[in-house]
Amino acid sequence: MEFQGRICPRGASYYTWQAGDTVQSVAQANGTTVQAMQVLNPDVNFTTLPAGTEICLPSQSYTCISGAPYTVQPGDTFTSIAAALGVSTYELLERNPGVAPDSLTVGQVLCVPFASSGGAETPSQPAEPDSPLLPTPSLPARPDTPPVVIVPIQPTCPAGYTRTAVTAGETYADLLVKHNVSYRAMRSANPRLSPGYLIAGQTYCAPPHGTRQVCTGTQAYTVLAGETLDTIAADLGISRGRLLSLNPSLLPSDFTQGAVICIP
């Protein structure tokens, strides 16, 4: 797959993938998280990424989509961090997709919940006014420290998507087959759903049946019986080339009944 001409969000930087890199090693070396790497590069499969490919490297503001960054200290374990924060290991895993709980390393960055008062999430420590970095939360040191209040994470699904939950024993491949959607579509809609660590009860946004791509800045449309590339383009008043450019992952022959396409 070719990734030339990648455009990264403002504040993010570019990184050229090197031989031997893994998403975990690059995230740790740059003080960010696997979650942030996946969110900024939804079309990238890091397990098969060839050396020389350019990707987006998250800035500090992208490190944790929900919560605050925490740097793993000597002696920390996934269980001890969760216990010290007063959260379940499930909650901590939800905030850190792609992280292997049994192989944490010193210096690795995790996303942990903000402390909350009055129901609104706020950082446990205020940032210095002139500091470009978010504060690193400290784990509670005393038993009388007020417990962290957790705000449950519920995905907000795009229009046409269905919120559903992982059932016991389901794999990521099972989800793709069940909903008949592409890996790219599922990953783009659910960056926090880790393919290797599905847990029964986790909620996710199921794309419409037959989705191969995610429509950004456009609308999703399901092709009806009898419609073709030509008829859809004519009905929309655009050229076939324009319609194909809005659907770069589709072949002209893919515009058949049931296919989900992007339209202006």
Image (tube, rainbow, N blue to C red):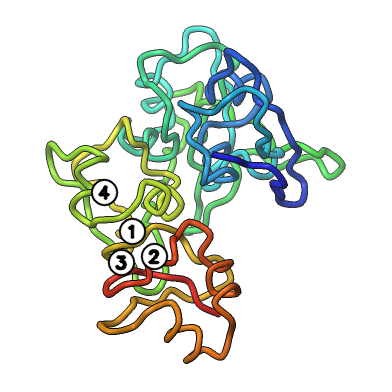
Q: Which mark is residue 208?
A: 3
Q: CA distance from mark 1 to mark 4?
A: 12 Å
Check whether the beta carbons of the residues at disc 2 and disc 1 lie within 8 A of each other.
yes
Mark 4 residue type: Leu
Q: CA distance from mark 3 to mark 1?
A: 9 Å
Name the mark nearer the viewer: 1 or 4: 4
Q: Nearer the viewer, residue 163 or 247?
A: 247
Mark 3 residue type: Pro
Residue at image mark 2: 157
Whole-percent x and y of residue 69?
59, 34
Q: CA distance from mark 4 to mark 3?
A: 11 Å
Residue at image mark 1: 205
N-term-proximal mark, 3 vs 2: 2
Residue at image mark 4: 176
- Disc 2: CA contacts within 10 A as few (<14), some (14-19) or many (>=20): some
- Disc 3: CA contacts within 10 A as few (<14), some (14-19) or many (>=20): many
Mark 2 residue type: Cys
- Disc 1: CA contacts within 10 A as few (<14), some (14-19) or many (>=20): many
Name the mark nearer the viewer: 3 or 1: 3
N-term-proximal mark, 4 vs 3: 4
Residue under the image location 28 percent in, 84 percent down: 226
Residue 61, placed above or below residue 137: below
